[in-house]
Image (tube, rainbow, N blue to C red):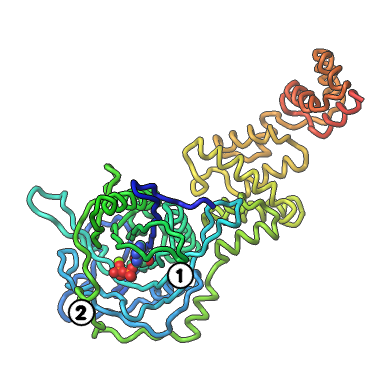
Amino acid sequence: MSEYRIQGATGEWEVVIGLEVHAQVTSNAKLFSGAATAFGAEPNTQVSLVDAAMPGMLPVPNMECIRQAVRTGMAINAQINKWSRFDRKNYFYADLPQGYQISQLYHPIVGEGSIEIQLDDKNPESLKTIGIERIHVEQDAGKLMHDQHPTMSYVDLNRSGVALMEIVSRPDMRSPAEAGAYLSKLRTILRYVGSCDGNMDQGSMRADVNVSVRRVSDKPGGEPFGTRTETKNVNSVRFVMAVVEQEARRQVAVIEDGGTVVQETRLYDPERNETRSMRSKEDAHDYRYFPDPDLLPLELDDAFLEECRASLPELPDAKRHRYETALGLSAYNAGVLTADVETARWFEALLAETAAKAKKPEAEVAKQAANWLISELFGALNKLGKGLDNSPVTPAAGAELLALVTDGTISGSIAKQVLEKMLESGDGAAAIVEREGLKQTSDTGAIEAAIDGILAANADKVEQYKAGKEALFGFFVGQTMKAMQGKANPGVVNELLKKKLA
Ligand code: ADP
Ligand code: MG
């Protein structure tokens, strides 16, 4: 695999990246209160007295949020800490009525784990393991609204107290592509597990991007890491990649100009595609962390952990492997179908229906179903600006169409037309074929007549074919199918053509 390098004026540079991802935990209630968490509610309608930090209110851990964090940890093969504790991170901000955030610094709930990324489906060499240092749970803050009044800012506390998982990677990534692949894979896993909806445009997942650069060297392990900057709250995979690229180039220029990189917090401006300094970086001791006296340590028993483990679905890597080995799909197709949990679900429903209709094991119809979904349905939906989530064609309807191809009622090319009509009308495949008279014909008389016409009109090509240019066979098949408006049974066409050309 070619390595990512930045060519500076004085030599080549390597970029080192670590991501801290904040993922909003999927839960109906907040981390320490019963208030609701629905996105897009009217400001300050989902705020309990705990979230507003009224005196005397006490936090009570929501075990559903804890469960989701544990399940996420298990999904990245991490160590789960049966004993963990909440700490207060103290700072003042108008969207933080408590004056501190309840977080976990010293004893996080999840310890070391890892995620595998693969930049190139076709190249197993491009597989790379990215270490994860920890996952802890913490409260989100509220939101300031500066656009409601000319001279005042408003605060919306709906988000105050919502549970977040902070997932901290090791500084193991070395290129924008690796950072993007890591974030996508993490999102995929969270969505499979169901612990976060992964909606980056709604802020359910946001990344703090830590970047440093160092000179390329042939020392084992390379030069020591350089000073890093942290670009906060980046909310798309594309932006994360852009931040890495821009920030690495900026740092190289600073160092080559004789300056030093300052450890600081930066912000990304997508419009100008640049990062800007926000504030110098504070250290953990600045926040005066201490154990939250309102909360007991969190102790998890084996029964709870077992329940968490038993509730995990088949995860993306395992599913992908199974699609390749047990179903015989190509690495590419298996990758596409497992990249999103909804796609995998749709495919598995299609596969089950297709196998049932064909009365065959799933492995025997998997390729057909996968190819149709990826090459036909995705393209057709794309044209309509739709996705599988709002597809007018259901898995059962797709299976009905595939069955008509399998039993020879229609040809593959007619199936494309039928699919378009299914998407337009919402009608079933069999009904459309019947109504439009699209049934494939095995009527040898009609097919023979068509073939005779084609061969007569292309006497020169017939001669070339007989002289050994066998590639022309496909041409004759194509012409015959065209003459039959796609409705001839391809098997019969092949057979008759061979006979006539022999
Ligand atoms: P903090 O909690 O102060 O942000 P951490 O040591 O926990 O600091 O690191 C935060 C993130 O920064 C982690 O994702 C880590 O991988 C990454 N990181 C640490 N050192 C570097 C470095 N030199 N270059 C790039 N990323 C780094
Ligand atoms: Mg940090």
Q: Residue 155 at what x, y percent from top left?
A: 17, 60
Point out the tag, 1 or 2, that comes first from the N-terminus: 2
Q: CA distance from mark 1 to mark 2?
A: 30 Å
Report the disc number at residue 57: 2
At horizontal 42% and vertical 59% (from top left) the residue drawn is: 197
Can you tell which mark lies on residue 72? 1
339 w.r.t. 298: above or below: above
**Quadrant of the displayed image that contains ligand 2:** bottom left
User: Which quarter of the picture shows residue 501?
Assistant: top right
Mark 1 Cβ and ligand 1 under 8 Å apart? no
Tell me: residue 375, above or below residue 471.
below
Q: Residues within 10 Å of mark 1 (few under 14, many from 20)?
A: many
**Identity of the residue drawn at 50% across and 45% down:** 387
Q: Quick one: SS at disc 2?
A: loop
In this orientation, does residue 362 appear?
Answer: yes
Instruction: State the image quarter where residue 266 is shown.
Output: bottom left
10 Å neighbourhood of mark 2: few (<14), some, or many (≥20)? Answer: some
Q: Is residue 22 in sight in this rendering?
A: no
- Which residue type does callout 2 highlight? Met
Q: Position of residue 19 (x, y in %)?
A: 37, 62
